[in-house]
Image (cartoon, rainbow, N blue to C red):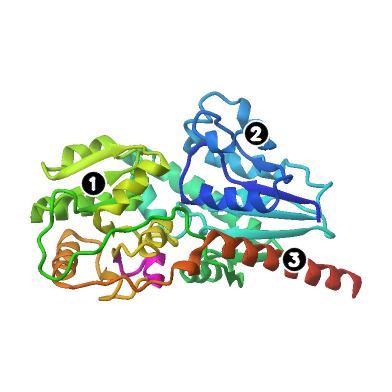
Amino acid sequence: MRVALVYDRVNKFGGAERLLMALHQIWPEAPVFTSIYDQAGAVWAEGWNIKTSFLQSFPFAKKWHEGFGWLMPLAFESFDFSEFDVIISVTSEAAKGIITASGQLHICYLLTPTRYLWSHANDYLTQVPKLLRPLARIVQGKLRIWDYISAQRPDYFIAISKLVQKRCLKYYRRESEVVYPMLGLSIKRPGLLSEGQALSDKEYFLVVSRLVPYKRIDLAIEACNKLKLPLVVIGIGSEEEKLKRLAGPTIKFTGYLTDQELIEYYRNARAVIMPQEEDFGLTAVEALSSGIPVISYKYSGAAEIIKDGETGVLFDEQSVDSLVEAIKKFIQLALRENFHHERFSKKLFKEEFKNKIKELWTKHQTNIYSR
């Protein structure tokens, strides 16, 4: 199989980028087609064969891609995939909208249907200045039409979680299979606290996330402010300064960390807090696979792998009061490490994903020759 990979943009690093790296390890010769590539923000992709769209030459596109959302459809439709047999798009936006020939196989590994058009459309509109919202709604409506049409182009969908699988069916009317992502970091964990044992200076609650609005890091900060508990916030993003102003004396921000630095913070964390509605949540996998409990919003993809009261605590509402009650409940529990370490190993993920692609390629070939 001649394989090509397609990704929305290569300009940052996070859980989705770890997935792309794993796929690139499976098919190291595969070029990566993307709208824009920022070498400074994506040093992890150094040495890759990256094919960019016409947006690469646009001023500010590398750093301010949000302003070019209306051009993303054209950017991905302009690529030529004629020399490839299998094209794998990894996307939460426009990369699934590529155009392929009938003999080719296009598989979309769906991170989520485009958030600002579907599941969180209203949340994104509230971030637009009021005077511009009527125009934003028109643009949003036009892009929603294209996004639905583009979602009919992949031959098969693979979703990263059951939550994303449900969204795929709801918004795109497409069936999908679930292949959970793999563990990003492996962390050797010291012993956990027993019930009633006090927190030391090195035992804090932890947030590991991009600092953007939908992650709702403000809830974790306000809850720990209220309870006067230590919280370490790891990550960078557009909300960073706003969140720092919200934080009390028990809150610490680290900014961007290397993997080794991040592992050290994981090791001494009492629990990871995830207040967001996550599509899946590799942070939860990293924590749970190392015996670190997770306090998570109940209607998040991360909740699929958390056993409430055993490996973490789930809370019902995205509110400070609901999270405060969850933290109080968590402190009263004696949680022990009982999570299956190998379930989300990178090795198993790569084997499962590669076998799934081969299976779908064989099925696709059989369908072609049986016509």
Residue type of the residue flagged with mark 3: Lys
Which residue in the protein does label 3 denote? 358
Q: Residue 31, can we see it?
A: yes
Residue at x 29%, y 51% (from the top left corner): 207
Which residue in the protein does label 2 denote? 47
Taking depth in this image into account, of 295 and 198 the one nearest to the observer is: 198
Q: Percent x, y for residue 21? A: 58, 48
Taking depth in this image into account, of 259 and 156 the one nearest to the observer is: 259
Residue type of the residue flagged with mark 1: Val
Label 1: how many Cα within 10 Å (few below 14, some 14–19, many 20+): some
Which residue in the protein does label 1 denote? 232
Q: Residue 153, can we see it?
A: no
356 lies left or right of 105: left
Q: Quadrant of residue 315?
A: bottom left
The residues bearing labels 2 and 1 have C-alpha atoms spaced at a distance of: 34 Å
Marks 2/1 in contact by CB < 8 Å: the verdict is no
Q: Percent x, y for residue 329? A: 16, 70
* Quadrant in the picture for the N terminus: bottom right
Residue type of the residue flagged with mark 2: Gly
The residues bearing labels 3 and 1 have C-alpha atoms spaced at a distance of: 43 Å
Label 3: how many Cα within 10 Å (few below 14, some 14–19, many 20+): some
Q: Percent x, y for residue 19? A: 55, 53
* Mark 3 / mark 1, whichever is N-terminal: 1
